[in-house]
Image (cartoon, grey):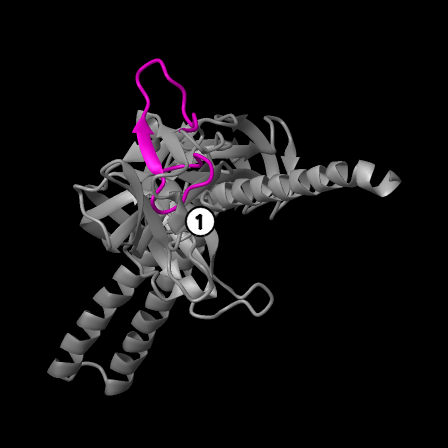
Amino acid sequence: MHNRTYAPFRAFGLAALVAAAAACSQDAGARETGKGGPGGGPGGRGGAGVTLAPADVASPRRAPLEDAIPVTGNLAPLERAELRARLEGDLVAVTVREGEAVRAGQLLARFEAVEEAGEQRSAQADVAAARSVLSTAQWNLEQTRELHREGAVPERDVRLAEQEVSAARARVAAAQSRLAGTSSTVSDTRVLAPTSGVIERRLVNPGEHVNRGATMFTLVRGDVLELAASVPERAAAAVQPGQAVRFTAGGREFTGRVARVNPSVDAASRSVRVYVQVPNPDGALRAGAFATGRIVARTVPDALTLPASALREGREGEGPFVYRVEGDEVGVAPVTVGLRDEAAGVVEIVEGITEADRVIVGNVGLLGRGMKVRMAGAGEGRGRGEKGGARPGG
């Protein structure tokens, strides 16, 4: 009696459990439709859908694309010269300050030169006296030779006169050498800029006593700057002198050229040192500024480009692919990728799609082959699910 009373209730409970399990299975199948990949679930055709905003769809377009190698580093002056004192003495004038632009040959400082000027005048007098003695010796030689031809003097006198001329010429040479030395000393009392540039450091002041060899100024040549950067070993083969380098420094864009490439690979970093020279005639760039740039190895003038966010990774053993809008459904197109411009966020598509295709870009949620596509109006948001499909997440 007891068992017959509750049997209908147990049968009803079993039926409810079976119905719930079937519903869960159907719901899991609907979710399976949204899985991405080239072989998106065939059950999605006519099932789950996705609503796309205009910004979620892009067409490939033709544009120049550069094969570029990123580089970073600090800009350094092409030339930096430390000007040292060539003599010991007191400074009577310093005519430049730090940060001042100077031209080649410009006076930077001047030493007290009274003693040096006196020695120079003495050397000049010695040269004049030696030349006078030489002139007299040469006249005596000519006269002696004439007398010898007439038989008035022996040959011995001619030889003595020739020796006097040789000695006089030696005294002239010695006097001229001394004059050159004193003239150089006088010149050293005037410190001149060896090249055009900017005074980076000034280490002396008027009235100071400066020792020989002491650093007085640091002069940098700022019309050409140089960036020393390291590129990976695998990319170094594509870098050649003369290639253009586009980079940003100090909030501005500049163009330089690869000047030199180190012939050896650094054993520790497995990189190659590359030197880029940057013209800076107006001084807009500052030495020491940090620069980020790209060495342009080659350029494809008419590449078929697509935003990099449109690329999807295929399953193991398969190449990349894109989702494209085919009528009112999501289609899958395997593609072959060429150059990549990481800075611009675009890639070159060698084959797989054309300019007429409409490709889904960015993260619009779970996608699969055959999903229904609806383009949102001006006031509608992205990712609103169609019948049978959950709203895809961003």
Q: Position of residue 200 (x, y in %)?
A: 52, 34
Q: Let me know if residue 277 appears in the view.
A: yes
Tell me the kind of residue under disc 1: Val
Residue at the location (60% across, 38% down)? 89
Q: Is residue 379 magenta?
A: yes
Q: Quadrant of the N terminus?
A: top right
Q: Position of residue 100 (x, y in %)?
A: 45, 26
Relative to 225, is 89 on the left or the right?
right
Relative to 125, is 137 on the left or the right?
left
Residue at the location (25% across, 80% down)? 158
Q: Nearer the viewer, residue 254 or 374?
A: 374
To which residue does mark 1 refer?
Answer: 71
Q: Residue furthest left?
A: 150
Q: Secondary structure at mark 1?
A: strand
Q: Is residue 34 magenta?
A: no
Residue at the location (49% across, 32% down)? 390
Pointer 1: residues within 10 angstroms few (<14), some, or many (20+)? many
Compared with 249, 225 (above or below) is: below
Relative to 207, is 223 on the left or the right?
left
